[in-house]
Amino acid sequence: MKKYNRVIALLAATSMSASLMAGCGNTATPATESTDSAQQTETATTQSSDTTAAETTAAETTESEGASLVGVEPDTRLASEAYSELWDVDSYQTESSDLYNKVLGEYYEEYQKALEAETLSERYALEAIAEAKLLESGVFIPLSTRGGNYAVSRMAPGSVTKVLWGNDDERWHNAIVTTEFITSEDHLALKEMLNELRGTGTYQTEAKKYLEEKGYTIKDSYNYPSTSDPVTWDVLATSRQADSRILIQLYDGLMEYDVENVQQPALAESYEVSDDGLTYTFKIREGVKWVDSQGREVADLTADDFVAGMQHMMDAMGGLEYLVQGVIVGADAYINGETTDFSTVGVKAVDDYTLEYTLEQETPYFTTMLSYGVFAPLSRSYYEGQGGQFGQGASAGQYGTDADHIAYCGPFLVTSFTEKNSIVFKANPSYWNKDNQNIKTLTYVYEDGTDVTKSYNDAIAGTVDGVALNTSTIETAKADGNFDKFQYTVDTDATTFNGFLNINRKAYANFNDASVGVSAKTVYEGQRTSIAMQNQAFRLAVCASLDRASYNAQTTGEDLKLNSLRNSYVPGNFVTLPEDVTVDINGTATTFKAGTYNGEITQAQLDADGVQIKAWDAETLSSDGFDGWYNPDYAKESLATAIEELAAQGVEVSAENPIQIDLPYFSGSEIYTNRANAFKQSLESTLDKNVVINLVACESADDWYYAAYYPEYGYEFNCDMCDVSGWGPDYGDPQTYLDTMLPDYAGYMVKSIGIF
């Protein structure tokens, strides 16, 4: 699962994948502006989250009821001070399960039907129906995707793959970078060339020729604006894109997508699939060397290194393991501790250069999974030499603690790392494909996002090679003549950033530092908010009250405020039906023709349920580029329903006694401060001050991330709403998104709503 604790790097240039989440997976909203990654890539009884202090219990089992404040005396202590009394660790799992069943039970039921589908078309259709139920729950509102903004760059379009899943869209070693900014005219011409040559294998050669004929000088270095440092250097122990976008430069996968979106041999020269589709056999490339950070050879790469990598990934439990559960034979039993014998898992080294994966069932998207870090190799001998052990709970020793304690088999070595300053990569002299490597020096330049003009000034100076333009730098670029000459609009991608609603808040200060992100709410006010958040009508009222276009304009500018808006979790054009299929929608057999997009089916279910969300536009065949959620009339109607239902639980909601929602934001950034204020203004005015947004200032990007991006468990999320993270797909099936909202710690993003 791509752990995208979403930090979108608004600083990144056209080809810069901006996000703090892993590979694809969990991504964090960057502490700057969004960049062009594509150019590169119930019914259950429950308590309120604060019931311990008030000793309240759930009254009923309907969505509109649950925890109650009837007869409860207000507790005027600050919630942050009474934190340890507000919940009970032993009951947290049960409470989470009850709330999940109440809030997401219908989604889960529909999703399980999809997993049991007999055909691929039926699976896609049922997944789309399940997504409709997820959107209807109101536990999050889709906000935006990456891209859709203005940018200037020295990197040519088509320098990395635009395939929608995996990490390959952040591999920079074959980027085409010039010493000068590429003009708007030439940028457009290159994009047209890419579309014409896609699949021929000739684009890179022709693009270089075009640029040289136009007088550009192609260089072998690339400077990338980065908003975060890695938390770990072990790619198999993290699902954060903030880590994987750095570590992806240091190893190769079995197969990799080229710039024309064609999957090519990398560490595997070829592969075969058995007639029943259950066994994939890869021929591993011979002569590939593992080296240390000094470039010294430490081992030969063999098939066993992929076995070691898979076991270490499952042992580390870093958030990737769920990807192979139910896919690779024996993976689920090993991960769940039902067996400690890894030989029962379906990944085998038949000999030194033959690798075999055995699957539980035919999985058409299996090869699309190979582009993500979960299938990265690990030098067994080097890992053990660093004190690393195998087996769940076993120590990794020194492995992955820094760039000097990992082995490399990719295009780059890390030669310098200065925290919150820079990471310098140099070409690996032992790289198996070094003769076809364009970039010899790669530098990640740290930008903390507090100065909204710094990244643009750095791009002009050549400190970085591209930058997304924000509301301030658009005007600067127009004034200095660079806008008309060099600007282009960044393509959007498959990453979806969400605003999550915390239905079970436990933390009222950051889990790593109780002096940061402190809520001003009392225990009683916190209880009221939690009970309201457990009401579906209330959640939908909140979601429908956000003017997302105005919110987005604070980052992209007024002209492009709609471009990157997304209205679904799974992009509406992510997959199409291979054949006609008939499925049940609210008791009516409904047939969808071959070629139908998943978004059309999701919309059909939303319409059948009478939920006023437009997640799909039939004319543009897209879920992007319009605001299908902002609906003041629907927001007021939903709030009226919620007020009536909450009154029965002893929760009065009025302008005199509003529900208070804490929203942490990066106060060190002008852009994010403006965005937070747009959020506050929109919700409060639409809901007639019956809901009040408390903006909780986080002075640094890290403080913001620790509130709602870095937490590993729902009880650590210090917010009532958060807009700091999202998700990007790990492989080419909608399951890669929908799995993130599964219960019992299986779904990575479900923690963002305060459970598990």
Image: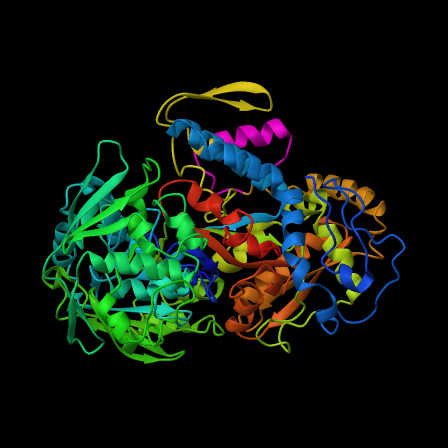
Please tell me whether residue 695 belongs to the stretch shown in magenta.
Answer: no
Point 74% across, 56% down: residue: 529
| Residue 727 in sight in this render | yes
- Viewer-side residue, 274 vs 411: 274
Which residue is nearer to you in this view: 510 or 193?
510
The image's colouring method is: rainbow
Residue 1 place in picture, x, y as percent = 42, 52
Q: Foreground: 366 or 249?
A: 366
Residue 272 image position (x, y, % from top left): 18, 40
In the rendered structure, the answer to whether residue 195 lies left or right of residue 596 reads left
Left or right: 36, with 525 as reference point: left
Magenta stretch: helix, strand or loop mostly: loop
Q: Residue at x 64, y 55 (%)?
A: 502
Quadrant of the image occupied by residue 412:
bottom left
List x then y, in percent, for residue 274. 21, 35
Q: Is residue 174 above or below residue 634?
A: below
**Along the line of sight, which residue is nearer the eye, 573 or 473?**
573
Q: Is residue 637 left or right of residue 360?
A: right
Q: Position of residue 487 (x, y in %)?
A: 35, 57
Identify which residue is drawn at 56% across, 29% down.
605
Query: Magenta part of the protein: which range?
Result: 601-626
Residue found 50% across the figure and 47% down from its top = 565
